[in-house]
Image (cartoon, grey):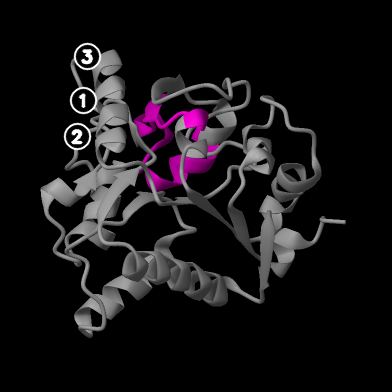
Amino acid sequence: MQIISVNDYDELSKKAYDSFVKTMNSLENPVFGLSTGSTPKGLYELLVQDYIQKNQTFHHIQTFNLDEYVGLAKEHEGSYYYYMYERFFKPLELTEEQTNVPNGLAKDFTGECEKYEQKIQNAGGIDLQFLGIGVNGHIGFNEPGTPFASRTHVVELTESTMEVNSRFFETKTEMPNKAITMGIESIMDSKEIILLVNGEHKAEALKQTVEGKVDEKFPASVLQNHPNVTIIADQPALSKLN
């Protein structure tokens, strides 16, 4: 693991942006794994700014999102498709063929998971996967206890994850209790992984990720086994590392 220490969120976003652009400009058809939530917002804002200023072209990229809530339509403001469409897909004028998010309204979720895995394989695999981390160590929506050998699957969300994510919904009762997520093995198949971590509230999770035992009880610990992981974290998030 390589750890890049930054002073604040803006610097974290800029380092993530630099990695994205480097990969995008070095490959003919780069494939990115993307995450949602508050952590990657700065990265997306910088990329959109680049596009508006005509500094970069994005016509040759393809993206796969980590996860989506079960039961939410694309148009629902709480869905991850909506998050990505508003902040990334639409501003960059990406086509439907370029973007992939699991279907939260699939009639056959087993088939949807298998289809998503096949799409990733057909694209040649993910060149650069961006991750965040939950306070309980989840990556994607792979909660504690998820087998390291898991592929894309439907997961029951833990109470702690639902509590944290309920802030994105008007009421807690609107918060879905299931999601489709890339599995841990799916994530580990990525050629390169960048983990973005900011804030003191993630310090203990980052410590366990880097220095803890590799254990399915703490999913992010599996990243110790990947040959090409970079962690970009601010000082508060790094505060508990030895």
Give the secondary structure at mark 2.
Answer: loop
Q: Relative to residue 143, is residue 235 drawn left or right?
A: right
- Label 3 near label 1: C-beta < 8 Å? no
Q: Residues within 10 Å of mark 2 (few under 14, many from 20)?
A: some
Question: What's the residue at 80%, 45% (across, down)?
Answer: 211
What residue did someone put label 1 on? 105
Q: Is residue 40 above or below residue 228?
A: below
Disc on the earlier residue, 3 or 2: 2
- Label 1 near label 2: C-beta < 8 Å? yes
Give the secondary structure at mark 1.
Answer: loop
Magenta range is: 162-185
Amino acid, disc 1: Leu
Question: What's the residue at 50%, 29% (across, down)?
Answer: 185
Question: What's the residue at 38%, 71% (across, down)?
Answer: 21
What residue did someone put label 2 on? 73
On whether residue 118 falls in the magenta region, the answer is no
What residue did someone put label 3 on? 108
Marks 1 and 3, how far apart in space? 9 Å
Marks 2 and 1, how far apart in space? 6 Å
Q: Please name whichever residue, 216 or 141, is drawn nearer the observer in this view of the structure.
A: 216
Q: Is residue 71 above or below residue 161?
A: above
Whether residue 140 is visible to the viewer of this picture, yes or no, is: no
Amino acid, disc 3: Asp
Amino acid, disc 2: Ala
